[in-house]
Image (cartoon, rainbow, N blue to C red):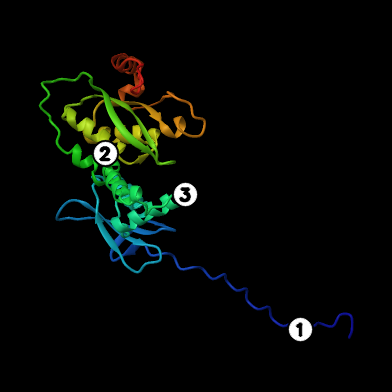
């Protein structure tokens, strides 16, 4: 072949475009999807008849959709509540709640794991007693802050000073070890035209204390829900607690107290207001005055 002879090469095959995955649907049954994750997906819709927010949840690995009515009032809060329900389902609104018999069998297993015989005379009734105690310990899962704080009062006689409730005793359980922690809660708020009955503040504490908890989260939950319900000028919550997961195991330090606080509004922004509150509650003892 001569040096300058042209050579016809076969035409290049057109480059293949990468196959694009189909986009996930933005709606399910006409309801906009607001969350999609490994747990499944959530659609959110406002019921025009009742005015309440509803979530359509489809857990991963199932073919069924479950619709639940939410307590939240705003779209953002409804989205958060719906996603929490799908991920954690602590109130068993989506997945089946274990039966009482399931729970009693689990207690028997724990007794056997501990090295004892769940069928001996002294332990035969223990599973039933434990479950009845758990029903009381964790009653907070069956109430909501919205239910407790739904009744407010606008007739305050122009009162716009601090409302403080101190030394609200509580019993809770550490979510890490499921052992008790106890103490007191101090709550204050400065109303902006709306107040709530003082017993409701104690009930709000009970709702969040009677769950598996960490003290930091419990402090924030109480403050956030009170601020959301009353829209006051500010909220302050201080909790002093003693944790048996630290006093009876691990480092075994007796009489150690943990103090947490959450401040919103003027309590966070104005040092004088915060100082007034701290002076009113004194030195938090958490039930450990001696």
Element class at badge 2: helix
Task: Write down the quadrant of residue 239 in the picture.
Answer: top left
- Seen in the image, is 39 located left or right of residue 54? right
Task: Write down the quadrant of residue 158 in the picture.
Answer: top left
Whole-number angstrom distance, CA of label 2 to CA of label 1: 83 Å
Residue 207 can be seen in this image: yes
Q: Is residue 174 above or below residue 261?
A: below
Image mark for residue 222: none
Residue 263: image location, x then y, percent:
34, 26
Disc nearer the start of the sequence (2/1): 1
**In the depicted view, which residue is nearer to us: 116 or 246?**
116
Residue 123: image location, x then y, percent:
35, 49
* Residue at numbered disc 1: 8
Q: Is residue 40 above or below residue 183?
A: below
> Which numbered mark, 3 or 1, is in the foreground of this view?
3
Circle 2/circle 3 CB separation < 8 Å: no
**In the depicted view, which residue is nearer to us: 215 or 149?**
215
Residue 87 can be seen in this image: no
């Amino acid at each position: 072949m001569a040096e300058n002879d042209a050579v016809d090469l076969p035409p290049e095959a057109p480059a293949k475009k990468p196959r694009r995955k189909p986009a996930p649907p933005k709606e399910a049954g006409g309801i906009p999807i607001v969350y999609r994750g490994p747990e499944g997906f959530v659609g959110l819709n406002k019921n025009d008849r009742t005015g309440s927010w509803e979530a359509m949840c489809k857990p991963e690995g199932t073919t069924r959709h479950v619709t639940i009515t939410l307590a939240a009032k705003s779209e953002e809060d409804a989205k958060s509540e719906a996603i929490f329900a799908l991920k954690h389902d602590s109130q068993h609104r989506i997945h089946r709640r274990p039966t009482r018999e399931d729970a009693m069998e689990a207690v028997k297993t724990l007794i056997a794991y501990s090295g004892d015989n769940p069928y001996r005379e002294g332990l035969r009734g223990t599973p039933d007693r434990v479950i009845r105690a758990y029903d009381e310990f964790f009653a907070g899962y069956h109430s909501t802050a919205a239910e407790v704080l739904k009744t407010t009062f606008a007739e305050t006689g122009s009162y716009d000073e601090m409302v403080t409730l101190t030394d609200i005793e509580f019993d809770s359980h550490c979510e890490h070890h499921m052992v008790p922690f106890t103490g007191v809660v101090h709550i204050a708020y400065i109303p902006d035209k709306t107040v709530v009955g003082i017993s409701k503040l104690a009930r709000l504490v009970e709702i969040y204390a009677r769950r598996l908890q960490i003290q930091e989260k419990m402090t924030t939950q109480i403050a956030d829900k009170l601020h959301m319900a009353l829209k006051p000028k500010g909220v302050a919550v201080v909790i002093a607690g003693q944790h048996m997961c630290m006093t009876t195991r691990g480092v075994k330090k007796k009489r150690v107290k943990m103090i947490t606080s959450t401040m919103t509004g003027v309590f966070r922004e104005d040092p004088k207001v915060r100082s007034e509150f701290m002076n009113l509650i004194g030195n938090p003892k958490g039930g450990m005055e001696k």
